[in-house]
């Protein structure tokens, strides 16, 4: 035998065919990996766009909700104001309007004694004098006459004050 090994061509064919198949398979798997990576990138891009879409949708829903809440608050405030106005109108119808004095009214308001005070004083004096003349005992007639005259004078004077506008009339 010789030192050199001479390969058999059949064995060489088998080796080359195995190498060719390996190269072809590796080439096919390489393209598949690239395609898989491209698909994953496309899926990721679609997911991102869906997330962005959902964020936009979420934002528009939030803005619409805030606008609706603001409108509801405006309506509620308007309803509260209308209720308050109705209550005030009912109160004004039920109660007399309080008289407010302006500066001109307070400036022209009479100073001094009211008619009621004057009537009380005059009535008390006249009643006491009449009581002394009628009942001549120790002053009992003066006291009774003074009280009766003061009451009558007060009522007459108070009526004059109401008519003149010095006192607000009772309803």
Image (cartoon, rainbow, N blue to C red):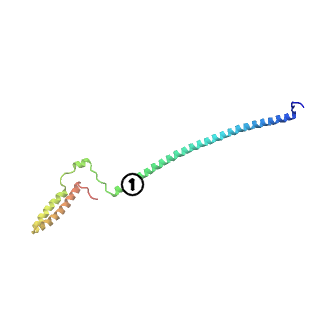
Residue 149 pos. (x, y %): 16, 63
Disc 1 crowd rating (10 Å Cα; few below 14, some 14-19, many 20+) is: few
Instruction: Classify 140 as above or below 160.
Output: below
At horizontal 86% and vertical 35% (from top left) the residue drawn is 11
Q: Tag 1's secondary structure?
A: helix
Left or right? Give the position of 29 relative to 43. right
Using residue 37 as the reference point, say whether residue 133 is left or right of it: left
Residue at the spot of label 1: 86
Q: Where is residue 29 in the image (x, y as percent from the top left)?
A: 74, 38
| Outermost residue to the right | 1
Q: How many marks?
A: 1
The quarter of the rendered structure image containing the N terminus is top right
Estimate the x, y position of residue 70 in percent, counting from the top left.
47, 47
Can you tell which quarter of the image residue 143 is in? bottom left
Q: Quadrant of the C terminus?
A: bottom left
Viewer-side residue, 2 vs 138: 2
- Going 57% across and 43% down the picture, which residue do you hit? 55
39 displayed left or right of 134 = right
Residue under the image location 54 percent in, 46 percent down: 61
62 or 26, which is in the foreground?
26
Q: Position of residue 32 (x, y in %)?
A: 72, 38
Q: Work out whether residue 78 or residue 17 is closer to the camera in this orientation and state it.
A: 17
């Amino acid at each position: 035998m010789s030192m050199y090994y001479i390969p058999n061509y059949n064995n060489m064919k088998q080796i080359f065919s195995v190498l060719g198949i390996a190269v072809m398979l590796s080439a096919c798997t390489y393209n598949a990996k690239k395609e898989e990576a491209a698909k994953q990138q496309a899926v990721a891009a679609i997911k991102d766009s869906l997330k962005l879409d959902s964020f936009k949708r979420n934002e528009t829903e939030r803005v619409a909700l805030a606008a609706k809440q603001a409108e509801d608050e405006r309506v509620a405030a308007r309803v509260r104001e209308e209720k308050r106005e109705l209550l005030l109108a009912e109160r004004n119808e039920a109660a007399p309007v309080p008289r407010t004095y302006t500066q001109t009214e307070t400036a022209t308001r009479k100073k001094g004694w009211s008619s009621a005070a004057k009537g009380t004083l005059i009535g008390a004096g006249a009643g006491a004098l009449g009581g002394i003349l009628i009942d001549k005992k120790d002053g009992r007639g003066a006291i009774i006459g003074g009280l009766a005259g003061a009451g009558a004078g007060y009522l007459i004077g108070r009526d004059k004050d109401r008519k003149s506008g010095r006192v607000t009339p009772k309803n």
